[in-house]
Amino acid sequence: MNILDMFSLKGKVVLITGGAGLYGKQIVSACAEAGAEVVIASRNLEALEKIAKQYRNSGYTVTAYRVDLGEEKSVLDLKNFIEGKCGRLDALINNAVARPMKGYTDDMSSFEESMHINATGLFIVTRIMGDFIAETEGGSILNIGSIMGMIGPDPTNYTGTSMNAWYPDYFFHKGGMINFTRFIASYYSDKGIRCNCVSPGGLFQPTMPEAFVKNYSSRTLLGRLANDTDLKGIIVFLVSDASVYITGANIPVDGGYTAK
């Protein structure tokens, strides 16, 4: 097979949880542009449909579907929808994340809500869709983590701003996701399914305080935050046949933040 053909997602069906968020838009763009038939799913159908419509208008195949990842029946309904519409599933990208906690001293109900979606929900959708992928010819499961699952927060990034990083649920779940990736890679290995994790760094947003941008950028080797295309290449690589001998890996895409 030609090397460029190995990166193609033509003929593949890809499910992306989330899709309307900052990194989610890059993931949808990457998979659609690489030729995949894409289904994006989350609780906010209105936001997803706006994204899906944009890509359909450009000639890509992107469908939005409402799902509650914390409810097993909702995820089963999603699986049945994809099976009826597409007949198969080749890849699952676990991108959705809830952020109910706003600080370390929040009421415990916010941590419990986070656990329900980000831990239980992650397991539900991975098990149901992993078994679905196994019914065909195998494929790929890709978890979207964060460098915050690899390291602790650096308070100096927020000097001169009102921002902070005291979100214990986010660090808890993203750290757990990395080892969950290894578990899933092992569990489905005899079914031809690979599982990897991508851990992005900070994504630049125009609303970010100038002090934060300067502080954070100085912590990276490349001297900047991520832009709106930096994640696309690794997504296509890990979902495509170009990475058929990679599984159980966690790959930081952070401009060298965790290497410095």
Image (spheres, rainbow, N blue to C red):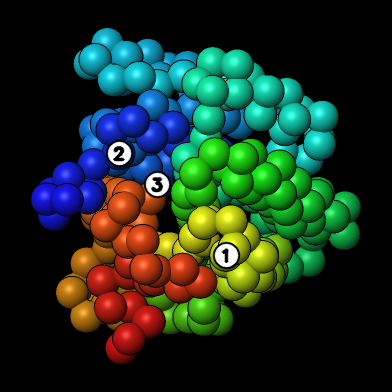
Residue occupied by mark 2: 9
Per the image, label 3 sits on a secondary structure element best described as helix
Of the numbered discs in the image, which one, if any, rests on residue 216? none
Residue occupied by mark 1: 189
**Distance Cα–Cα, label 1 vs label 3:** 28 Å
For the point 40% across and 46% down, the residue is 23
- Binning the other alpha carbons within 10 Å of mark 2 as few (below 14), some (14 to 19) or many (20 upward) gives many
For the point 29% across and 20% down, the residue is 60
Residue situated in front as seen by the camera: 207 or 17: 17
For the point 32% across and 86% down, the residue is 259
Q: Locate residue 29, reporting x and y percent.
A: 30, 35
Tag 1: residue type? Ser
Earlier in the chain: of badge 1 and badge 3, it is: 3
Residue situated in front as seen by the camera: 192 or 98: 192
Instruction: Say which quarter of the image contains residue 67.
Output: top right
**Distance Cα–Cα, label 2 vs label 1:** 21 Å
User: Residue 129, relative to residue 215: is it above or below?
Assistant: above
Frontmost of labels 2 and 3 is 2
> Taking 191 as reference, is 72 left or right?
right
